[in-house]
Image (tube, helix red, strand yellow):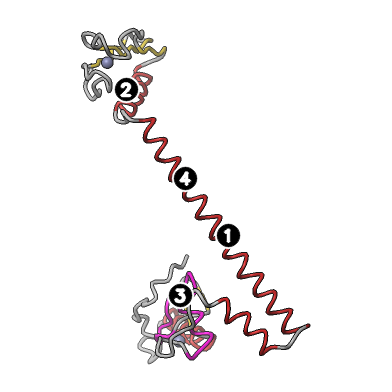
Amino acid sequence: MNAGLEKCPFCACEMRLISFGSRQVLSPTEAHDQMCILASEKDFEVAGGEDFGDALREAWNWRAGHPNLAQEVAEREQRIAALERRLQGDAKIMHDLLVGNQAAWIEWQRGAGAEAAMTWVQNSLMGVGVPDEGAPWATEPQAWWDANKAEPFPTCFCGRPSNWLSRGRGFCGEAHMREAEAKEAAEAAGKTGLPLFDGTSPDTEGGACD
Ligand SMILES: [Zn+2]
Ligand SMILES: [Zn+2]
């Protein structure tokens, strides 16, 4: 009857679960220790069949497995508060980046022109730095963006970063997407061995794509 029941989390006495048909009673096998905070409590009882007994066992075991529940909750609250502070900080960074871009746009359209507007952009890079000239794709704006954005598409079969997405595969441009589609159509029609896309290029960017 007491199979699978945790001991009392406060005095470590053995517990048991007894089914009286329509009543399920959880109580100490003997008794709680005199000093146990459950010593003066009545037995835990639910009205219902044995599946209610299973639920009672589960609830008891969960609580018995968390003897420092108040401390656990306090730690989680601290963690949540820290995450909230972090979130607010990130939101401010994002906000200021966008306002900086607006200032750059104002400079471009209503101020000293495009060259001066770029100073706003350059200033926004003080924290992260400008791309190192030797870094991959550092001389191609589109490829730089494709390779370094937060969630890059899967790499094109030619090895370049992608900005086209088609049925879970990435392509560096429309030409390579059409090429892959043509090969797929040909294969569906029973032609194989086309000297085109071999479909084996590794996803070097590790891009998430769904
Ligand atoms: Zn106890
Ligand atoms: Zn390509």
Q: Does the CB distance between marks 1 and 3 fall below 8 Å?
A: no
* Residue on which disc 3 sits: 169
Please name whichever residue, 140 or 20, is drawn nearer the observer in this view of the structure: 140
Q: Nearer the viewer, mark 2 or mark 1?
A: 1
* Residue on which disc 2 sits: 57
Please name whichever residue, 37 or 203, is drawn nearer the observer in this view of the structure: 37
Residue type (three-letter) at the residue carrying disc 2:
Arg
In space, the residues marked 2 and 4 are separated at their CA atoms by: 30 Å
Quarter of image, ligand 1: top left
In space, the residues marked 3 and 2 are separated at their CA atoms by: 49 Å
Give the label on residue 148, or none. none
Residue depicted at 49% across the width and 45% down the height: 81
Residue depicted at 42% across the width and 12% down the height: 47
Residue 150 counted in the magenta span = yes
In space, the residues marked 3 and 4 are separated at their CA atoms by: 37 Å
Q: Nearer the viewer, mark 3 or mark 4?
A: 4
Label 4 Cα crowd, 10 Å radius (few <14 / some 14-19 / many 20+): few
Earlier in the chain: of badge 4 and badge 1, it is 4
In space, the residues marked 2 and 1 are separated at their CA atoms by: 45 Å
Q: Main secondary structure of the magenta part?
A: loop
* Residue on which disc 4 sits: 80
Dot 2 lies on which element? Answer: helix
In space, the residues marked 1 and 3 are separated at their CA atoms by: 32 Å
Earlier in the chain: of badge 1 and badge 3, it is 1
Dot 1 lies on which element? Answer: helix
Q: Does the CB distance between marks 4 and 1 fall below 8 Å?
A: no
Q: Is residue 187 above or below residue 85?
A: below
Earlier in the chain: of badge 2 and badge 4, it is 2
Residue 147 counted in the magenta span = yes
Q: Which residues are magenta?
A: 139-160
Give the label on residue 91, or none. 1
